[in-house]
Every structure is written in C-alpha cells, then in structure tokens.
Image: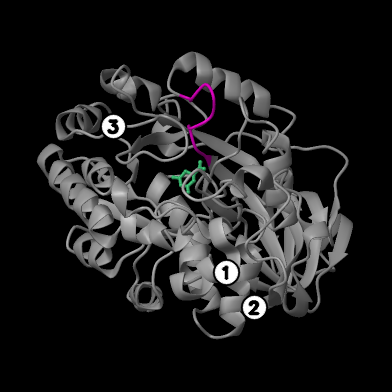
Amino acid sequence: MPVFHDLALKNGSVVLADKTVQTTLYVRDGLISAIGENSTTHVADQTIECTGLTILPGVIDTQVHFREPGMEQNETLESGSRAAVLGGVTGVFEMPNTSPPTTTLETLNDKLNRARQHMWCDHAFYVGATADNADQCGLLESHQGVAGIKIFMGSSTGDLLVADDSLIERVLRSGHRRIAVHAEDEARLQERLSYRIENEPASHPIWRDDLTALQATQRLLTLARKTGRRVHVLHVTTSEELDLIAQHRDIASCEITPQHLTLTAEEAYPRLGTLAQMNPPIRSAAHRQALWRWLEQGLPDVIGSDHAPHGQDAKEKPYPQSPSGMPGVQTLVPIMLNHVAHHRLSLRRFVDLTSAGPQRLFGLVRKGRISVGYDADFTIVDLKARWTIEPRWLASRCGWSPFTGAHITGKPIGTMIRGHRVMWEGTLAKHPIGQPFRFEATEKPLS
Ligand code: DOR
C-alpha cells in the first residue's frame, strides 16, 4: 500500500540535526511526514524539484520592530512580514515599542488581531515591561502568542524604559519565562549626552560607549542571579559582555545581529552616516573581531535582525535628531549566508543560531529542526547564487537598507511555512498564512 503525502521536496540537500543529506522530504497536513523514503511506496500530490538547493529548518528572526500600530508609514505587520518571507524568514518575534506600546492585555490582543490574516510568517509578540505593569508581567507573559517580556534598560525608539534596579527586580520576580533585555545603562547615557557631536554620527558609539552596555549587563546579571530568573541579552556588541555572559550560562543567553557582525564604525559612519545609527551602536573593527571570536566559542545563542525601519526623511535629519535603527529582516539570511560562503561560520552554526537556538531558548512547539512530526517550515537556499542586494528587491516600507549594493553569495529561493509555499523565487503566495507561534510555557496543561 502506498503512503500518501501532500507534498514532496525532492533531492534537496537537507540539513538535519546530525548531518546534511541529499534526500526527499515529505509533508502532510503541514507537518514533516517522512524523510528519505522510497518514491515507489511514498507518493505525493505535488512535487517540487530541489536538486542543487539546500533545505534548512525555517529561519526565525527573534527580534524585529514592525511599526503597527502607530507608525504604519514605516512598516505594517503585513509589509514587515512580507519582507521577512521574501528574505527566507519563516517566523519573527516582534517588539513592543509601537504606539501605543504593547504593555497590556488589550494592546497585545489588538496586535494579535491585526496579525490575523495579514502576517506572512509565523509570529509572537513581546510585551514591554513598565512601572505600571511590573507586577502583572507574569500574567501577561502567560498568554498565547506572547514571546515573553521585554525590558528596555536604556531608552531607545519609543518611551519604554525600566531603568532602576528596584523596578527591574520587580519585573524579574513576576513570572518565569526568559526575559529579553535591551541592556544599555540609562544613567550613563544621560550623563554622557554631551559626547554627542552635532552632525557627527560617528560620535554615537562614543556617547553609547562599551561601558554603557557592560554596566547594564552587569546589573542585569546580578539581578537575574538574585531573583533566579533567566534573562536573554539582546544584540550584544562587546567582548566584555560576552565574557560576563559566559560566566552565567545557567541563567543567561544572548543574541547577536548581522549588522554588528558585518559593519564597523571605521567604515560604516563615513559611508552611511546616520543610516548606520542604531542602539546599541555599530562599534569598532576590534569589537567586531571579538564578536566573531565569541561566535566560534558557542556564544551567542541566536541571531536577531533588530529590524527597525525608520523613514529616509527622518534618517536624513542631522545627528542626533536622526532616529536609531536600521531595517534587516529581509537581509538577515543573505548577509549570513554570505558569511558562510566566506567561511566565517559554518552552515550548521547558522542553523543553530536561527532555528535550533530560538527553539531551545524559548521552547517553541514543533519548530526549529527538520524532523518527522515537526512543522514543515523550510528556508530553501541556493548557497552558490551570486547576486547584489538592490533597492527594488526590498519590501520594507522604509525603502532603504544599509546593505544595498552588497555583493552576496547565497540566496533565499523558497520560504515554506507549515507546508505552504509562501515565497518561491521572489514570488509570493496568494494570501498570507502566518499564525502565532506556540510555546511550551503557554500551552494548556496536558490532561
Ligand atoms: O536602534 C534601535 N532601534 N534600537 C532599538 O533598541 C530600538 C530600535 C527601534 O525600534 O527603532
């Protein structure tokens, strides 16, 4: 008796948990139903030929800022997630600094409702911690569709801020899930405002210096230890922070961004001006080298693009009136595949950072690996394709990228989510089908 499937992805180079094999993947009802079975006994309604292509577990971008509600001229949940799938990303964790910010059950439900039938990729939303909701964070993080709680220790775009140790401690004591933190020390930022030089974006990393990041991470780890709460340090930029995090691996994880691994202060501020301005800042070549060294050591755990679209008009304002942030959800896969092509990291480490890592840290249900019974989420790439990132390829409403003009080896060819071919060779499916991620922590108890 033949075994029936909905779909077969034939002869791709498939990155499994322990090896990469040229084989056929079968999908039924949105799940991976078989791997490498004989095509005489296994039949599928539809077959996609994948010879020459590499099939990775779906890439999850664990940090994006889409701008809905409130700043839809820069991005919507639809446009941001469209950019994601065009770039090979199958799921995103979205940040709470919208307008209004996602800090209550009401604003969370509003985002989840807006996402329904509009988001192209799977998604979860962070809830921002504030002085008002500090003691309710445990309740807020327990809702389905929530990635966790986010703390801004230093001010960035929007007005979310939890700067004092006593308030941070209250947030850490409310709830149990891993808490994501933007670690820049607000007091030091305020003390050093005079280091910003008018019209000089290169002064941004001098104002928001290494110690600004390190001090916040030190304070955070002390509080995490005191309260026994697991923390996730977002976009780490300095060797010293990683050094410290390495001493607290039982309670601390961390994220790195493609921009901090790719750009340097020496090169980026003269070339890109305020387009290179982000928080925490792009730092020196020496820092970048240290980040690569730490990547080899098994830190960090995940890559997030910190996709933070701002309109070109706003970015053209003279520094420091210009806002901080750059888009990146669509360029994450290409930029990192290019690093793989240049042997700066292995494809396996890339998969670890973008699918296995998010699953491990956040307890995603049925995501993060190519395995029978898991969701059929795939990022299908051509590792050898050589191309240039051009403005017309970009879908973000902000209309620019720090990586425009970059020559890239490695291209996303297909984005498959729960067995649906959402993007293939730059063409989108008819309708978005993104759904909220499921997390172990928010699943109903098994009866
Ligand atoms: O540069 C940044 N931009 N860093 C952040 O933390 C926020 C982001 C934004 O939302 O614009």
**Crowd band around label 3 with a 10 angstrom C-alpha radius: few (<14), some (14–19), many (20+):** many
Image x and y of residue 386, in percent: 76, 80
* The quadrant where residue 238 appears: bottom left
Q: CA distance from mark 1 to mark 3?
A: 41 Å
Which disc is residue 288 wearing? Answer: none
Residue bearing the label numbered 1: 16
Image x and y of residue 398, in percent: 69, 45
The answer, for residue 18, to whether it is visible in the render is no
In the rendered image, the quadrant that contains the C terminus is top left
* Residue placed most toward the observer, 200 or 277: 200
Image x and y of residue 77, in percent: 67, 35
**Crowd band around label 1 with a 10 angstrom C-alpha radius: few (<14), some (14–19), many (20+):** some
Q: CA distance from mark 2 to mark 3?
A: 47 Å
Image x and y of residue 3, in percent: 79, 55
**Magenta stretch holds residue 97:** yes
Looking at marks 1 and 2 on the same chain, the residue that comes earlier in the sequence is marked by 1
* Residue placed most toward the observer, 425 or 41: 425
Label pair 1/2, CB-CB below 8 angstroms = yes
Q: Amino acid at mark 3?
A: Val
The answer, for residue 242, to whether it is visible in the render is yes
